[in-house]
Image (cartoon, grey):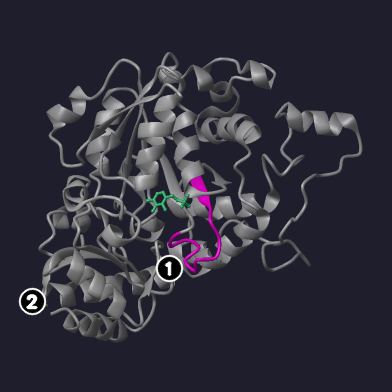
C-alpha cells in the first residue's frame, strides 16, 4: 500500500481480503486459537513463527487495524492498546525502567502528566518537564546520562501548543535517545511526525480516529528508524537477552523495524494485558475509513468558530493554532499546513460566572469531558473537571477560571456559530 495516497490508505489500508473472504475486517471474537500439535504452538511461543495463541497478547482483528494506522503514519510496526493511557505508558516503559529518566514537554494531556509525574515516578522513573518553547540550551541541559526518551504532543490537549518535532528530535538524537510523539490531535492526516524525525508515535484512538465517541483505545507505531544496537548500553531491554522470553535479544532478532513493538507485545502486553477488544478495533476501523473526510471538516469548523470568537467583544482571548494571532502560528504552518484540529479554547468577559452562564445557554454543543467527537462538545474546566481548585490555583495550572474548551464536531459551522452567539448574548 505504500505507493497509495493517504485517503486510500484510510479506506483500504491494513487488510486485503483474498478470494471469497469478507470485504469488511472480520471480528475475531475468540480468546484463544487452536493448533494441531504442541510443536506448532511452541514455535509461536518461541517467536519462531507468526501467529496467534491468546488474545491478551495479540488478536488478528487488532493487527489489521494496527497495520492500517502503521501505514497512515509511515511506520514499520504497530500495536493497538486498550486506551491512549496504555499507549503512553507502554511507549515509555518499553524503554525506561526504575532508575531511568525521561524528558517530556510540559504541555501534555493531564492524564499523561499524572501518569508520568505521579504513577511512573512511584515506579522509580524520573521525569523532567520542559516548556515546548524552551531554548536549545535549556533543552540540552535537561538530559542526563540515564535519560532514555523524549516525549511531546504534536498539538497539546488542552493547551493547543504546537510541538517543534524537528528540534526535539535533533536534541534527542544528539543524546542517543528516541523521540516519542503523541499525535492524537493532529492525526496522520494533518501531520506525520515520523517524517519530521519522531521515532515512536502514539495515539489515543478514542479521539478523532474513532471519532464517534464509541470506543476507548490507543495505538503505538514504530518508525523503525532508531538504531537500538548503536546505543545498546542505554537500552538493555532491547539489546540484551530477555530471560523472561527464552533469551531472545529483540534488536538482534527483529532488527530496528520490529524490535520495539515485538518487545512491547511479548513483555508488556503479556504482563499488563492492556489490549484493545477486537470489537473496539472493528469500530475504530469504521472511524478510520472516513478519517480523511472528517478531519477536514473538523478543521474548517474549528477555524470558522475561532475566527468568529476572535471578532466577538465578549470574548477576551482565543487560543487556536490555526489563527494568525496564535503564538504557534508559524509552527502550525510548518507542521500542519492543511489544518490543525477542531478544538478551540477561549475566555469570556466576566470570568468564571460568565463562563458558567455561557455553558448553561448552549443548545447545540453538549457539555462533556470528551473532545474530538463528531458531535460538538464543550467543557468549562473550572466548574467541572477542575472545580476543586480556586482561581489562583487554576491560573497556575494553565487552566484559567474563564477558560472554555470547545471541540467542534461535524455539524454545519453556521449552526455552531449561532449557538455560540446566542450563548454569548446571555452573558450580561
Ligand atoms: C485523551 C488523550 C489521551 C488519553 O487517551 P485515553 O484513550 O483517554 O486513555 C492521551 N493523549 C492525548 C493527547 C489525549 O487527548
Q: Residue at x 10, y 63 (%)?
A: 325
* Position of the N terminus by quadrant: bottom right
Q: Is residue 340 above or below residue 248?
A: below
Which of 216/303 is in front?
A: 216
Tell me: 296 left or right of 27. left
Q: Residue at x 59, y 42 (%)?
A: 274
Would you name the residue on which mark 2 appears? 313
Are discs 1 and 2 less than 8 Å apart at CB? no
Per the image, is 209 magenta? yes
Per the image, is 385 magenta? no
| Residues rendered magenta in the picture | 207-221
**Position of residue 99 measured from the top left corner of the image (x, y, whole percent):** 41, 16
Residue 304: quarter of image: bottom left
Q: Is residue 368 above or below residue 110?
A: below
**Position of residue 7 measured from the top left corner of the image (x, y, whole percent):** 45, 66
Would you name the residue on which mark 1 appears? 373
Which of 335/267 is in front?
A: 267
Amino acid at each position: 500500500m505504500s505507493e497509495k495516497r493517504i485517503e486510500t490508505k484510510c479506506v483500504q489500508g491494513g487488510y486485503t481480503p483474498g478470494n471469497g473472504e469478507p470485504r469488511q475486517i472480520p471480528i475475531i471474537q475468540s480468546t484463544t486459537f487452536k493448533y494441531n500439535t504442541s510443536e506448532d504452538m511452541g514455535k509461536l511461543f518461541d517467536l519462531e513463527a507468526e501467529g496467534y495463541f491468546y488474545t491478551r497478547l495479540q488478536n488478528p482483528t487488532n493487527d489489521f487495524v494496527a497495520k492500517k494506522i502503521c501505514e497512515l503514519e509511515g511506520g514499520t510496526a504497530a500495536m493497538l492498546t486498550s486506551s491512549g493511557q496504555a499507549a503512553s505508558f507502554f511507549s515509555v516503559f518499553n524503554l525506561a525502567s526504575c532508575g531511568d529518566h525521561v524528558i517530556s514537554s510540559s504541555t501534555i494531556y493531564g492524564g499523561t502528566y499524572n501518569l508520568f509525574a505521579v504513577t511512573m515516578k512511584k515506579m522509580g522513573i524520573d521525569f523532567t518537564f520542559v516548556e515546548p518553547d524552551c531554548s536549545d540550551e535549556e533543552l540540552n541541559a535537561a538530559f542526563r546520562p540515564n535519560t532514555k526518551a523524549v516525549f511531546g504532543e504534536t498539538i497539546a490537549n488542552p493547551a493547543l501548543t504546537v510541538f517543534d518535532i524537528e528540534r526535539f528530535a535533533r536534541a534527542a538524537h544528539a543524546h542517543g535517545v528516541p523521540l516519542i510523539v503523541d499525535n492524537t490531535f493532529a492525526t496522520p492526516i494533518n501531520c506525520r511526525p515520523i517524517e519530521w524525525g519522531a521515532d515512536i508515535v502514539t495515539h489515543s484512538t478514542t479521539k478523532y480516529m474513532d471519532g464517534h465517541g464509541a470506543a476507548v483505545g490507543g495505538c503505538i507505531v514504530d518508525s523503525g528508524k532508531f538504531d537500538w544496537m548503536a546505543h545498546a548500553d542505554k537500552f538493555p531491554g532491547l539489546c540484551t537477552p530477555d530471560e523472561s522470553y527464552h533469551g531472545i535479544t529483540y534488536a538482534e532478532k527483529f532488527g530496528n523495524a520490529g524490535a520495539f513493538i515485538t518487545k512491547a507485545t511479548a513483555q508488556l502486553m503479556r504482563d499488563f494485558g492492556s489490549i484493545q477488544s477486537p470489537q473496539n478495533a472493528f469500530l475504530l476501523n469504521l472511524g478510520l475509513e472516513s478519517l480523511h473526510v472528517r478531519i477536514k471538516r473538523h478543521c474548517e469548523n474549528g477555524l470558522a468558530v475561532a475566527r468568529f470568537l476572535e471578532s466577538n467583544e465578549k470574548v477576551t482571548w482565543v487560543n487556536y493554532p490555526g489563527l494568525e494571532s496564535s503564538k504557534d502560528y508559524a509552527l502550525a504552518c510548518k507542521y500542519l499546513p492543511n489544518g490543525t484540529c477542531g478544538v478551540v479554547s477561549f475566555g469570556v468577559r466576566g470570568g468564571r460566572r460568565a463562563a458558567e452562564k455561557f455553558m448553561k445557554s448552549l443548545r447545540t454543543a453538549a457539555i462533556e469531558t470528551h473532545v474530538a467527537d463528531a458531535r460538538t462538545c464543550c467543557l468549562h474546566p473550572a466548574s467541572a473537571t477542575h472545580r476543586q481548585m480556586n482561581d489562583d490555583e487554576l491560573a497556575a495550572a494553565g487552566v484559567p477560571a474563564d477558560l472554555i474548551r470547545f471541540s467542534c464536531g461535524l455539524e454545519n459551522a453556521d449552526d455552531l456559530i449561532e449557538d455560540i452567539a446566542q450563548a454569548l448574548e446571555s452573558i450580561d
